[in-house]
Amino acid sequence: MSHPEVVEAQRARDVSSKAHRHAFTTWYASVPELAPCAEALYEQLRAPEQWRPYADTAATLAHLTRSGLRLGVVSDVGWDLRATFAHHGLDRFISAWVHSYEHDTEKPDPLLFRHACRELGVDPSETLMVGDHPAKDGGAVGAGLRSYVLPAGAAPGSLRGLDAVLRLAGLASA
């Protein structure tokens, strides 16, 4: 069943925190059993303890930073991810944070990726963007970055195959 209000709420959902909340609570509320708790579900989505990093995340980020690489996050969720990363001890690896809602745009806008490169002090042509959504993260290519989109299907908390990132960065043997 199609819900036109849900479809409409998804348009430009990542350009502001308000739009993001509206998109998700409208989606949840489209299920009659979930409607009474749509706001609570959104707050649960935002809760750092509800997120589970992939099992190989910390080791990969640690290896990259020990090698002298600066890392950034370009996100299109509707809230600041610093608390989530801090909750899981991953914030210490990140040097730049770019959230689409702070820039009144959303992925795949190349502006977000160029902004991250400026924040990191790196040339886009010497930067590898690692993402999980081909269409949204494709904006990195438009900004001049090399890009690697992780294969779909890994469950939260499982191994994600981030060893490929180390190989692409020239830090591990093929």
Image (cartoon, rainbow, N blue to C red):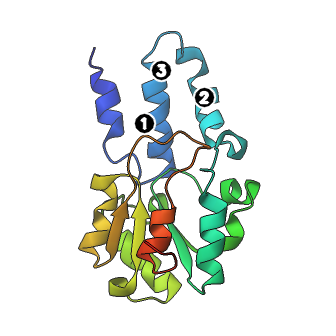
The circle drawn on residue 29 is 3
The circle drawn on residue 23 is 1
Q: Is residue 110 visible?
A: no
As drawn, which residue projects farthest toward the front?
174
The circle drawn on residue 41 is 2
* Type of the residue with mark 2: Leu
The circle drawn on residue 14 is none
Q: Residue at x 46, y 76 (%)?
A: 116
How far across and how far down the image is residue 75, in percent? 48, 59
**Circle 2: is it few (<14), some (14-19), or many (20+) Cα within 10 Å?**
some
Displayed quadrant of residue 27: top left
Q: Residue at x 45, y 65 (%)?
A: 164
The answer for how far apart the CA atoms under marks 3 and 2 are is: 10 Å
Q: Is residue 123 above or below residue 85?
A: below
The answer for how far apart the CA atoms under marks 3 and 1 are is: 10 Å
The quarter in which the N terminus is drawn is top left
Q: Secondary structure at mark 3?
A: helix
Q: Residue at x 45, y 15 (%)?
A: 31
**Circle 1: is it few (<14), some (14-19), or many (20+) Cα within 10 Å?**
many
* Type of the residue with mark 1: Ala
* Type of the residue with mark 3: Ala
